[in-house]
Image: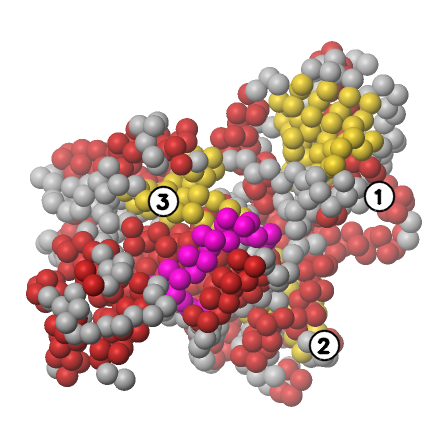
Amino acid sequence: MLVDLEWLPKPPAGFAGRAGALEAELAAGPGATFHERLTALAATALDEPQLVRLSRLAGKARGVGIEGFSIAKLALLGDGTLDLAAAPIVGSGLRHGLLLDVIVGEYGSAVQDAADPESALRAAGLDFALICPDPRLLGLDRSADGAAEAEVKVKAAFARLAMIAEGLRPSIASAILVQTVTPPVEALFGSFDRAHPGSPFAMTLALNRRIAEWAATGAAILVDTAHLAASVGLEQWSEPGHWHASKLPFSPHLLPLYADHVARTLAAIRGKAKKCLVLDLDNTIWGGVIGDDGLDGIRIGQGSAEGEAFLAVQRMALELRARGVVLAVCSKNEEETARAPFREHPDMLLREAHIAVFQANWTDKAANLRAIAQTLNIGVDALVLLDDNPAERMQVRDALPLVGVPELPDDPALYPRALAAAGYFEATTFSDEDRDRAAYYRANAERAQALTASGDLGDYLASLEMVCRIAAVDALSRPRVAQLINKSNQFNLTTRRYSEAEVEAAERDPARHAIQVRLIDRFGDNGIISVLIADDRGEAWEIDTWLMSCRVLGRRVPEAVLAHLVRAASAAGATRLIGRYKPTAKNRMVASHYEGLGFRQIGGEAGGETAWELTLAGFEAPALPMRVEDSALPAASIST
Amino acid sequence: MSTLETVREIMMSVLQLDDLNLTEQMTAADVEGWDSLHHIRLIIAIERRFKIKFKNSEVEQLTNVGDLVSAIDRKVAA
């Protein structure tokens, strides 16, 4: 399944023609759905030459700039011949919403490239660097005498990686990625290798442990090639012939698989991972058709291989939910019939409470998926549809090319594997907010009911008993703040992306005012939901970044943030605020954000970037339906 | 399709050529873009299409397209 990217549909028969037509269109001026059509072509099981073909197209698209794709530059450096990986990574990037430029360090000069601030690599304006170590060039393919020597060798190998990373770091705008190393197929002693610290096998494991611990500190982001190699099989992964001939670090047949893993990791850093798993019901999460077979006729639960296979699908959905993936249902069924197993079947693991949006009706799936995205306030590009029916999958791919729709094998026992192989929900960190996200969406549904019950928006907001906590960004909040900065698309005025390191720099910069906002209500803690960074430019404060999570839309948080900003800026002696709106494909909802807050337009025009100004004198903070706890104001201003 | 014709197709795809006149007498020097890196890609694509594997020594012995074609035919027949 993995090697041939079988979770993706086969490329169209006329692949070359399609690629050529897109390239011609690009030259003439790309049409409205270019992004969708290019993504659809890339989201197929392409082989190496096809990925190289698309990389050429990506290169040209990068020159033009296509809305919907984000542009990034990646350097590959490390051991062995990495040149062959560059174009497949670029081609795979299109599948994940990225227009990549990949440059490769000179063979064997990773350390020099990283150490020299003037090296072509470091001067290239990199967003990302991927360090690709190979145990054979780290000296870990030759055994050590004993535990002490093994430790020295592993330490030295790790120190070299860390040196490359730290050398590069000042020249990397976004993140440094590092691969794990692959243990040899050939055992020295046999099973004893694992127990003997000096064996090449044990040393690669020891190095990987160090790399993982290092990544856990946030210093680098993992691309776990060791796990990938183990999943396809080490024998298939490693081809000594190609190593001896050209120093290819792994079998070139696996380039498409490897490249997809690199691309999906970059996409996750850029906030392009999927957010919601939409489940079909009949023959997807239980065996049989509920409308025909009835509650006691469907197969789910212990006792039959088929029932257990579907149970495993449900368990996987719940595991994903526990790590923050929202679950929804989309099924062609009568609603009551479809809900019955969730309510009444004793063997079902999935219950109604786990499902944020339940769409069971007879309209087409594409329309239902749009409705789900709308209800959850996310784009359709954040959805994945798990559906056993090939015709439905094709219809959805045609209508909504940005929805992730994995191909599924005939046997439901393999559904979890296909879904996992696709890597839709790739994440590079895991925060408390992620853990609770599914519950937020559930609570939001309850809030919606509370609104219906009270009928009046003011009463509703008052009934929420909100507490808004404004504080400076600090080490504790930094990971979540960086996550929001990189993921928020809709309520985001400038869509500027900053890494954790850049956020930290902003915290320390006395001329920057970086705050995080948390909202708590009687249904729970929403976590950090808004970030603002403003620059002190003397008489004016300029708002560099203002974003908010869409799950607290309509709760009047922006007004609380503005009131804070006015007080902070006044305390620093400023007389006005300046805000900018930079339009993107996704942030139209905030086009009149500043206007709504009483700013006056001072530049730009509708459709383009606009600039806004607010005079601080005479500003009156509105009464808000929340208690504001503000710890981010300078001491002098609190007494006022 | 003859082996030569299939190799021609693979070569066009690997080297991103719109057209290619390929004969058995030709060598890497005669084909635009056929450098050492693309040679690796070409061998890999051939291995994949014909479901065969070359040893390094076999690859090193190839002197022209004709050698490549007969090496493929030998492996496919074996």
In the image, the segment drawn in magenta is A44-69
Q: Kindly report the distance in space between the C-alpha atoms of the residues bearing marks 1 and 3.
A: 52 Å
Q: Are marks 1 and 2 in contact (CB under 8 Å)?
A: no
Question: How many marks on residues?
Answer: 3
Which badge, 1 or 3, comes first in the chain's sequence? Answer: 3
Dot 3 amino acid type:
Ile
Classify the position of the N terminus of chain A by image quarter.
Answer: bottom left
Q: Residue at x 65, y 88 (%)?
A: A292
Which badge, 1 or 2, comes first in the chain's sequence? Answer: 2
**Residue on which disc 1 sits:** A461
Q: Nearer the viewer, mark 2 or mark 3?
A: 3
- Residue A193 seen anywhere in this rendered image of the structure: yes
**Residue on which disc 2 sits:** A363
**Residue on which disc 3 sits:** A103
Indicate the chain on which mark 1 is placed.
Answer: A
Height in image: A168 above or below A105?
Answer: above
Q: Nearer the viewer, mark 1 or mark 2?
A: 2
Dot 1 amino acid type:
Leu
A99 in the magenta segment: no
Query: 10 Å neighbourhood of mark 2: few (<14), some, or many (≥20)?
Result: few
